[in-house]
Image (cartoon, grey):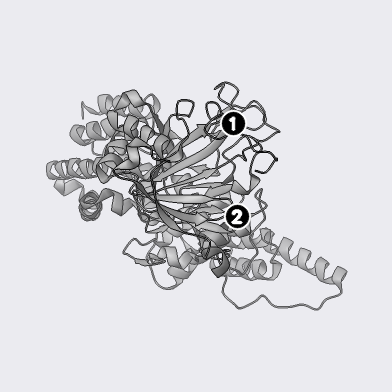
Amino acid sequence: MRLLPYILWALLWCCCCWPTQAEVFTSIGQMTDLIYTEKELVQSLRDYIQAEESKLASVKSWASKLDALTRVSTSDPEGYLAHPVNAYKLMKRLNTEWTELESLVLQNPSAGFISNMSVHRQYFPDQEDETGAAKALMRLQDTYQLDSEAFSKGKLPGVHSNALLTVDDCFDMGKTAYNEADYYHAVLWMQQSLKQLDAGEEAVVSKAEILDYLSYSVYQMGDLPRAIELTRRLVAIDSSHQRAGGNLRYFERLLFKQRNEMNQDYEAASEEPIQLGTYSRPKDHLPEREAYEALCRGEGLQMNDARRSRLFCRYHNGNKNPVLLLKPMKEEDEWDSPHIVRYLEMLSHEEIEKIKELAKPRLARATVRDPKTGVLTTANYRVSKSAWLEEEDDPVIERVNQRIQAITGLTVDTAELLQVANYGVGGQYEPHYDFSRKDEPDAFKRLGTGNRVATFLNYMSDVEAGGATVFPDFGAAIRPRKGTAVFWYNLFKSGEGDYRTRHAACPVLVGSKWVSNKWIHERGQEFRRPCGLTEVD
């Protein structure tokens, strides 16, 4: 027991003073390290159990469950985390459940286990990560029109796994939405939690707790009859509930007033179960939300026979560029107007692995430029981590840059550094322009190289589901294919922006998406891409 004050002091120090890795959930690549961290913690826990086996039966059971889980996850960390439910539950375990276990261990202190926890805690995800991972599942749910049960049972399009969500997991998902005043998703997840509980699944959370959140969320969605019915069920379970009685009387008075004002007879609550589509999803800031998400699902594509007849494939030697003479690039048309092309075998597997190796330790939350201030900041509509690589970092970066220059015929001397991005749980980048518009004239003033004339985007991984690059304005969707690259011009030859190139990176449903891109600027292109005679040449 003499060790107790020192152990408590060490824990307090690591909890309060050491930094945490916020925004871990935004990169699958970085999250793989947590798989090994969790594995090491499980081993440490086993050592602790051996020391005090008789006193820690409940902890041993917990460890056995995690031991089985980490054997699966460490066999293929990136593949394991490619499933969004596994990624969410990893965030939840390391943010919530390991902390609860730590408190239990402190009741019978073990210096070895606590020391190991203290060392690793600085790398644990925090509440922001768990919340971000939960919101990512909801984003996937919306974009790909998946009901809560599909996630709960691990039934994603083209994928069926044992990555399941328990009653308590679903309740925590709903509570996350509730705390954000997102009652639409709170209803969906509380209903799923209740459904699984009614089916006999064991849980820590009580039916009364679920009904409390569910009834109020349904009320916020404007469904008073169902809110009343759910609250009555709550009162029947717990007649002394602090809020239920008052809520029930308030809901009944409000419904009575509404019926009188509209001169309607009383109607019982619908007996149809709450599911996806029962309530309308609230509108948000994005005007093309429906078109964008439809394209992500493969719907609303504007490719037709006439357009397809104008698309060709060819060998491209960059106007007889020496770099490409012996091995010209395979070029495929992806779209006719604006012209978007894909280059096959742009990057080799070895080059991709090297670029990822260089980028991974530098990955930081991707930012966007505030159109009012010009300052780079993080945003909910861009969920990924990125790193910037220079030619001095490794010969492979110089080689890739020179290959881009040879293919496009544009100088990369004034281009931005090679940006590498890895998308996390539900990773996305909502519709945006790569070029600066007239209302943000100072966006690239610091660079002194003019606007972004073109985008060269390398796909460095295949993605099992989701993750397409879509163009809502003209209904195109381009699927990631490892080793290929796509290229398009953001500006007309006149220097005017081509607003048709507004595009988005769809949320990654299953998989880990790695890309790298080169933003090529105007300066230095004067003789390589001369101005046109009209504004839209």
Q: Nearer the viewer, residue 337 or 67?
A: 337
Query: Is residue 530 found left or right of 415 in the rendered image?
Result: right
- Based on the displayed image, in which of its 4 quarters is residue 324 positioned? top left
The answer to whether residue 33 is seen in the rendering is: no
Query: Is residue 20 found left or right of 189 in the rendered image?
Result: left
- Based on the displayed image, in which of its 4 quarters is residue 446 positioned? top right
In the rendered image, residue 223, in percent from the top left (x then y), is placed at 69, 66
In the rendered image, residue 289, in percent from the top left (x then y), is placed at 62, 55
Q: Which amino acid type is shown beneath numbered disc 2? A: Pro
Image vertical order of residue 64 relative to residue 22, above or below: below
Image vertical order of residue 456 relative to residue 394, above or below: below
The residue depicted at 52 percent of the width and 59 percent of the height is 296
On-image quarter of the C terminus:
top right
The answer to whether residue 120 is seen in the rendering is: yes
Residue 30's disc number: none
- Helix, strand or loop for disc 2: loop
Q: Earlier in the sequence, mark 2 or mark 1?
A: 1
Instruction: Tell me the mark number nearer the camera, choosing from 2 and 1.
Output: 1
Q: Which amino acid type is shown beneath numbered disc 1? A: Asn
On-image quarter of the N terminus:
top left
Residue 451's disc number: 1
Judge the density around disc 1: few (<14), some (14-19), many (≥20) Cα neighbours within 10 Å: many
Residue 472's disc number: 2
The residue depicted at 41 percent of the width and 66 percent of the height is 157
